[in-house]
Image (cartoon, rainbow, N blue to C red):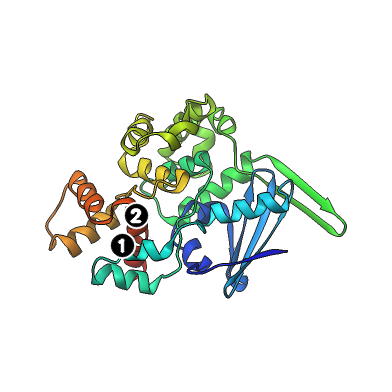
Amino acid sequence: MQSMRVGDFDITHTIESAQPLTFIGDERPDRKGITYTCGDSFVEVDQRGKRLAYRAYGSLGRARLSREIIARFGLGDDMGDVYRRIGTDAFMKKAVSRYRGMRITRNEPWETALCFVISQFNSVKRIRGIVKRLIAAYGREHTFSAGSVRLSFRSFPSPESIAERSTGDLMAHGAGFRARYMRAVAREWSEQRGFSKLRDKDYAEAKEELMSLEGVGDKVADCILLFGYGRLEAFPIDTWIKRVVERVYFRGRKQSIRKIHEFADERWGAYAGYAQQYMFHFARNE
């Protein structure tokens, strides 16, 4: 088991704030940790106070695993700077105080895209159920064996494995009307339409390209950019966020999505994604 010291990090708040890792992995509340798959490897992570303990079964070596953990859990983010930038008012300061240590995770873009296409008009519980059924049905099976340890698990389905299914197949796993969009996005991803290059593009350009995909609107595109590409300026707006922003910052007056984006960019700028996540988790639970 490897370990590293971490500050301003709480794995429970991070896992429970409806990020892609929540949909794909399995929380272990008794251990304050999570297990999840990363390609052909099975990863276990536990937090013990200020230390994060982790190990992998599969091809991830020690150095690669440490890099994976740092990247996956956003451990390279300067949380002091984040909190200074988003703690602009009493509401945000209260949200940060309640869920301090919650980080923005960075996930594989394809996995993030499929998860958030599924998320449309859906609850966290149902999203997780659909994703887990898709993994069980279409994920590639891996077996790890070393000494007394024997482990079988399935990795996240490839774009090709989703694209080749019928809408009926996907609906059988609970996807509903989203099945059509899942197949459409999977087809685009399987054709390697340059999605790896979105990291290097201007935020607005990258968002516009994602929104050209069938079934990907404003909110889903921002979720993909935030959790899949680490674009912390992205500010996903769903019903929760729209309602909270209007109530807290506009005295209950209705605002357009465009106006809310402009407000978030002006107020929180490069860390608008962190502001959104603390706002979302606080509003959802409090």
Q: Secondary structure at mark 2?
A: helix
Q: CA distance from mark 1 to mark 2?
A: 7 Å
Badge 2: residue crowd in 10 Å (few <14, some 14–19, many ≥20)? many
Q: Amino acid at mark 2?
A: Tyr
Q: Secondary structure at mark 1?
A: helix
Q: Is residue 143 left or right of residue 253?
A: right
Measured as percent of width and height from the top left, residue 69 is found at 59, 55
Q: Is residue 96 left or right of residue 248?
A: right
**Residue visible at 31% across and 41% down in the picture:** 218
Quarter holding residue 95: bottom left
**Residue visible at 48% across and 62% down in the picture:** 14
In the picture, the quarter occupied by the N terminus is bottom right
102 to 37, vertically: above or below: below
Measured as percent of width and height from the top left, residue 230 is found at 44, 47
Q: Which residue is mark 1?
A: 86
In the picture, the quarter occupied by the C terminus is bottom left
Measured as percent of width and height from the top left, residue 139 is found at 64, 41
Q: Are marks 1 and 2 in contact (CB under 8 Å)?
A: yes
Quarter holding residue 36: bottom right
Q: Which residue is mark 2?
A: 271
